[in-house]
Amino acid sequence: MVEAGDTTAAVAFRAEPGHRPAIASTGSLILDVAIPVYNEETDLEPCIRRLRDHLVEQFPYPFRITIADNGSTDGTLGIAERLSREFDDVEVCHLDEKGKGRALRAVWSTSDAPVLAYMDVDLSTDLAALGPLVAPLLSGHSDLAIGSRLARGARVVRGPKRELISRCYNLILRGTLAARFSDAQCGFKAIRADVAERLLPHVQDTGWFFDTELLVLAQKARLRIHEVPVDWIDDPDSSVDIIATATADLKGIVRLTKATLTGRVPISGLREQLGRAPIQVQAPGVAPSLVRQLVRFAAVGVASTIAYLLLFLLLRTFTGAQAANLVALLVTAIGNTALNRRLTFGIRGWKGSGLHQFQGLIVFGIGLGLTSGALAFVHSLSATGLPLEIIALVLANLTATVLRFLLLRGWVFRSRRQPAVEPAVERES
């Protein structure tokens, strides 16, 4: 629940990087809710009236509803203009071209409200979640807020086809763009205006991928994204083309992945302008400690060894032992280096990762020599077989593991160890 602030205080809204002041009520506009619409002459009026009634009764600050008509060819624009004449807190923004992202950009980039939101015109999301959505932005706790149909506590009514598509899409986002938010597609989001001002110039999509792209950039800029579990009921009469939307989203994922990897999007600059600095926790002695490193290295090593053996056994069914060993060891060595880099030695970000993988491959070469030598020794014996191969490989890998830890700690990641301060990872709910 949002508590009313000091109505006499001025709003100090432009903030230094990493600091988000609370937004105090001054009697001026606080929230601007954009409703992007295209050919919604049937649903528009009842939905706007319902939304406005809710805001009048439940939202304690001045608000505005902006109907963003993007190229409607029916009577949508006429209905929107009539509603804006009837209510002082309802406005219309008309664009000749289609595109949800284009409509939101037009409204958000010109709004004078410190908090910007949008929701789908069908109001599939229960409006009771609007207060919890906006509250952390008003208080300064968060930078963006999203409604989530996949978070714990959400209640959703929709068909299995849409449920499957939504979950698969979010899994793809996690796998390709390392997204940590649970639901990119829910049409129920809010953002602080100062954050939108910085992010919008870097968001290229003008369609349905717009808010996904905005969220990915916000996450990479280390902004705080607040998730609100919502009650959501699917609109069976929705005009959204699922196949076309999914295709456009996949193209957007490919484009955004390429842009972030090639540096076309200035992530480091956005972090400097907007990102919250990591919490610094003073740790006694060296950090991370040798004991902590050994425990984490051992855990990664166990997982890597299991993955290596499974992959070796799979490849061994249709290729020779040496070839299977080479491929299995190479694949797991790359994963092992990446996991140890982040978990064991506390190094995050892309900087230096290529060099670390190259050095890791040199360490891999030592491990390959040990395991290949062990296999050659077994094959030189009179009694050979798969059980002996596995025993020899396990013993060789144990030896290689000890050498790997010493080389990773003393050579590969030596220059990046920090002697006194270890960053703590902040995780959003």
Image (cartoon, rainbow, N blue to C red):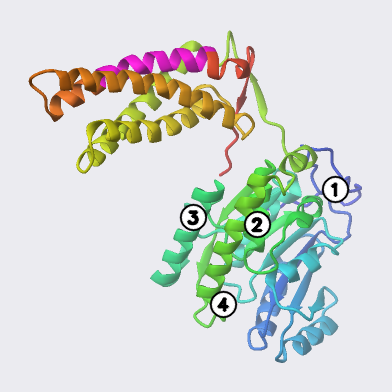
Q: Position of residue 65 (x, y in %)?
A: 77, 71
Query: Could you say which disc has been placed on residue 172 in the image?
Result: 3
Which of the two labelled residues, at mark 3 and mark 2, occupies the earlier sequence position?
3
What SS does tag 4 mark?
loop
Label 1 CA crowd tier, 10 Å (few <14, some 14–19, many 20+)? few
Label 2 CA crowd tier, 10 Å (few <14, some 14–19, many 20+)? many
Which of the two labelled residues, at mark 2 and mark 4, occupies the earlier sequence position?
2
Q: Residue at x 47, y 22 (%)?
A: 362
Pointer 4 residue: 240
Q: CA distance from mark 3 to mark 2?
A: 14 Å
Residue 425 against residue 412 in the figure, above or below:
below
Query: Could you say which disc has been placed on residue 213 in the image?
Result: 2
Quadrant of the drawing holding the C terminus: top right
Q: Is residue 374 left or right of residue 260?
A: left
Q: CA distance from mark 3 to mark 1?
A: 45 Å
Q: Position of residue 279 (x, y in %)?
A: 66, 28
Which of the two labelled residues, at mark 3 and mark 1, occupies the earlier sequence position?
1
Q: Amino acid at mark 1?
A: Asp
Q: Amino acid at mark 2?
A: Glu
Circles 1 and 4: CB distance less than 8 Å?
Answer: no
Q: Amino acid at mark 3?
A: Ile
